[in-house]
Structure formats: structure tokens, C-alpha cells
Image (cartoon, grey):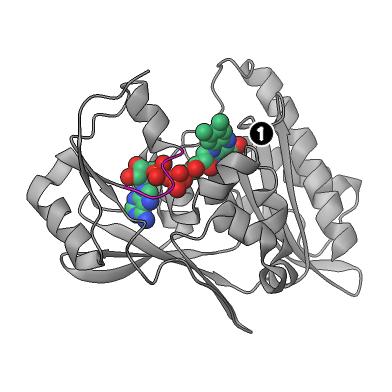
């Protein structure tokens, strides 16, 4: 598998990146860790005549953990997330999810920015970021703007980011309460058949806040507001769990593929969500 010929650029700053994007338009694409893009180029599923490597652009590799907000640079890798003690204390769901992505080799290269910008419904971080109510900062010829994760995904590989914009940071309100990232996959290192991200806040034995997002069960990640609402005001008993799963099933639209038929995917989604809610509840 050899990719088509391409020009390689390695600008030292964002101005250099934006200049190449502006000059070549659709024919140019940025690369972060390259662990989604390079395989696509080798399979000739992505044609990228002008490839812009982001690795030398400064200011996008930091992890900042504040009392109210967490800020991850786009070039922070999945391995960086796993190794960062302060981040793991502030938002343990990030580490739990990152540990379920691919294998250590991929995680050393794969970045947060690449994972969320890619728009692949199989990627784990988009749903995770929706669950955490994150926002993505993008910069382009008209300056910077923030896009909520819940408004970012439009279809498979189609996002609210313009072709001439680069994602620079992810901002996450520091979560509280219990958490769980549950993923069912065919084998170690695989993308999800179904995955669920759950954050729950418990007060006096009652659920007062619940945020739920699902992965690889539609052509975009699915933030299921209804599934969260079904838990509110309950003690997360069997009836509430059933209602939450039913609400989630109404929001997803899986399609048949080599991970199974629709009925199987719906079944797995229900099992995974139930498990994630119970784990999050036990940690709340
Ligand atoms: P790249 O491959 O460099 O880029 C991906 C796309 O995002 C490209 O279109 C690129 O132009 C764009 N992009 C990258 N950075 C930016 C930016 N800052 N601004 C704008 N656009 C940008 N992922 C999972 O979530 N779960 C899995 O289970 C999983 N399994 C995998 C198994 C294997 C064998 C492999 C090779 C990959 C797997 N991945 C999985 C994907 C992996 O996590 C990728 O590394 C990640 O999705 C993309 O990050 P990257 O930095 O490599 O992005």
C-alpha cells in the first residue's frame, strides 16, 4: 500500500500552516499523528496532494488543568492523556477512554485534535467530548472561533470545521461526579461496535445530572439528551435504567456492517449503556 505522490510541508508556525491551506484549498490537508490520515492515503481513500505536518507548530501540546476548565492542545497524544496524573484526577474518564483506543503504538502518535477533527464515527473521543460538554477552538483566515462538540459533527467525515481552519485546542469544563467509558469491540485494538460515555452527579442518593453520548452507532457521535433526562430525579433503579436505554435506542441509527446487523448493534448498545450507567453511578 503506497500513497499517491504528495508535497510535504512542515511549517514552524500557524501562519505558515494557514498560508499553505489558503494557497491549495481542498488539495491541502493538515496531519497531526498521521494514524488515521496516512492509512487512508495508503488505501487511496484520501487524496492529499499537499500534506502539512503540524508537529513543529508550537503551543498545541500542553495540558492545562484548572479548577473549572481543562484545556488540551490539539497535539496532545492519547499517551500524554494516560500519563498525566493531574488530568487523570480531574477527569478520569479521559484516561479510561484513551486506554481503550487501539494499542500503545497508535496511542503514542494519535492526537486529541486528530481524533476529534477526523469526523470518523468510529473514533472514541468525539462522543467522549460531547458527554463532557467540550468545545473545540479552530483558527482560520478569519480568526478564532469555538465550536461546541455537540454541534461539531454533521455526517461521517463532515464537521463544522471549514477546510481552511485548524483545530488548536479542546476546552472541557472540569467534570464532577461519577464517570464511565464502556466500549465493546471485536478484539483488542479494534474500533467500537458500541461505546458509551457517561458522567453522573448524585445528591442524596438521587441523580441530579446525567450526560450520555454513544459512539459508532450512527454516522456521527450521538449525544442522547433523552437518555440522561430519563435518569434525573431517580435513584437509578431498574425502571430508570430501562427508560434511559430505551431513550438512547430512539436516538441512535446503526447500520449493518462487518461489526454486525442492526439488531445486534442495538442490543450491544443497550448492554454497554446499562453497564456504563451502573459503573458511573457506583463512582458518583
Ligand atoms: P491524523 O491521522 O493526523 O489526522 C486525521 C484527520 O484529522 C485528517 O483528516 C487531518 O487532516 C485531520 N486533523 C488532524 N489534526 C487536525 C487539527 N489539529 N485540525 C484540523 N484537522 C486535523 N481511534 C479511536 O478513537 N479508537 C480506536 O479504537 C482506534 N483504533 C485504531 C486502530 C488502528 C490500527 C489505527 C491505525 C488507528 C486507530 N484509531 C482509533 C485512530 C487513532 O486514534 C488516530 O490516531 C486518531 O483518530 C487520529 O489522530 P491523528 O493525530 O493520528 O490524526
Which sits in the foreground, 123 or 53? 53
Q: Residue at x 53, y 55 (%)?
A: 77
Locate the C terminus by quadrant: bottom right
The single residue placed furthest to the left in the displayed view is 23
Q: Residue at x 50, y 55 (%)?
A: 112
Residue 192, quarter of the rendered image: top right
Q: Secondary structure at mark 1?
A: strand
Q: Is residue 65 left or right of residue 162?
A: right
Which sits in the foreground, 77 or 45? 77
Q: Is residue 13 visible?
A: yes
Marks counted in the figure total 1
The answer as to whether callout 1 falls within 8 Å of ligand 1 is: no
For the magenta stretch, what is the residue range? 31-35
Which sits in the foreground, 18 or 241? 18
Give above or below for 82 relative to 268. below
Reading the image, the residue beneath label 1 is 194
Q: Residue at x 68, y 44 (%)?
A: 196
Examine the structure image and report whether residue 32 is included in the region drawn in magenta. Answer: yes
Examine the structure image and report whether residue 33 is included in the region drawn in magenta. Answer: yes
Residue 55, quarter of the rendered image: bottom left
Give above or below for 12 relative to 21. below
Residue 121's spot in the image, x, y percent? 49, 37
Secondary structure that dominates the magenta span: loop
Locate the N terminus by quadrant: top left
Residue 242's spot in the image, x, y percent? 81, 41
Q: Is residue 1 left or right of residue 212?
A: left
Q: Residues within 10 Å of mark 1 (few under 14, many from 20)?
A: many
Amino acid at each position: 500500500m503506497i500513497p499517491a505522490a504528495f508535497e510535504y510541508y512542515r511549517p514552524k508556525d500557524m501562519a505558515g500552516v494557514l498560508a499553505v491551506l489558503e494557497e491549495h484549498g481542498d488539495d491541502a490537508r493538515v496531519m497531526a499523528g498521521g494514524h488515521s490520515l496516512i492509512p487512508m492515503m495508503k488505501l487511496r481513500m484520501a487524496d492529499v496532494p499537499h500534506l502539512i505536518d503540524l508537529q513543529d507548530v508550537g503551543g498545541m501540546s500542553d495540558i492545562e488543568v484548572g479548577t473549572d476548565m481543562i484545556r488540551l492542545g490539539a497535539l496532545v497524544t492519547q499517551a500524554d492523556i494516560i500519563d498525566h496524573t493531574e488530568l487523570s484526577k480531574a477527569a478520569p474518564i479521559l484516561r479510561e477512554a484513551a486506554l481503550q483506543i487501539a494499542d500503545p503504538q497508535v496511542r503514542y502518535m494519535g492526537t486529541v485534535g486528530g481524533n476529534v477533527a477526523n469526523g470518523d464515527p468510529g473514533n472514541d473521543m468525539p462522543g467522549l467530548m460531547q458527554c463532557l460538554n467540550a468545545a473545540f477552538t479552530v483558527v482560520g483566515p478569519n480568526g478564532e472561533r469555538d465550536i461546541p462538540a455537540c454541534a461539531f459533527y454533521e455526517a461521517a467525515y463532515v464537521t463544522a470545521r471549514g477546510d481552511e481552519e485548524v483545530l488548536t485546542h479542546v476546552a472541557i469544563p472540569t467534570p464532577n461526579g461519577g464517570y464511565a467509558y464502556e466500549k465493546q469491540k471485536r478484539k483488542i485494538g479494534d474500533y467500537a461496535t458500541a461505546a458509551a460515555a457517561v458522567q453522573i452527579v448524585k445528591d442524596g442518593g438521587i441523580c441530579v445530572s446525567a450526560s450520555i453520548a454513544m459512539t459508532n452507532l450512527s454516522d456521527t457521535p450521538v449525544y442522547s439528551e433523552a437518555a440522561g433526562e430519563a435518569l434525573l430525579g431517580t435513584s437509578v433503579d431498574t425502571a430508570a435504567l430501562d427508560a434511559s436505554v430505551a431513550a438512547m435506542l430512539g436516538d441512535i441509527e446503526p447500520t449493518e456492517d462487518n461489526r454486525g446487523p442492526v439488531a445486534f448493534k442495538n442490543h450491544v448498545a443497550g448492554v454497554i449503556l446499562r453497564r456504563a450507567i451502573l459503573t458511573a453511578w457506583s463512582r458518583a
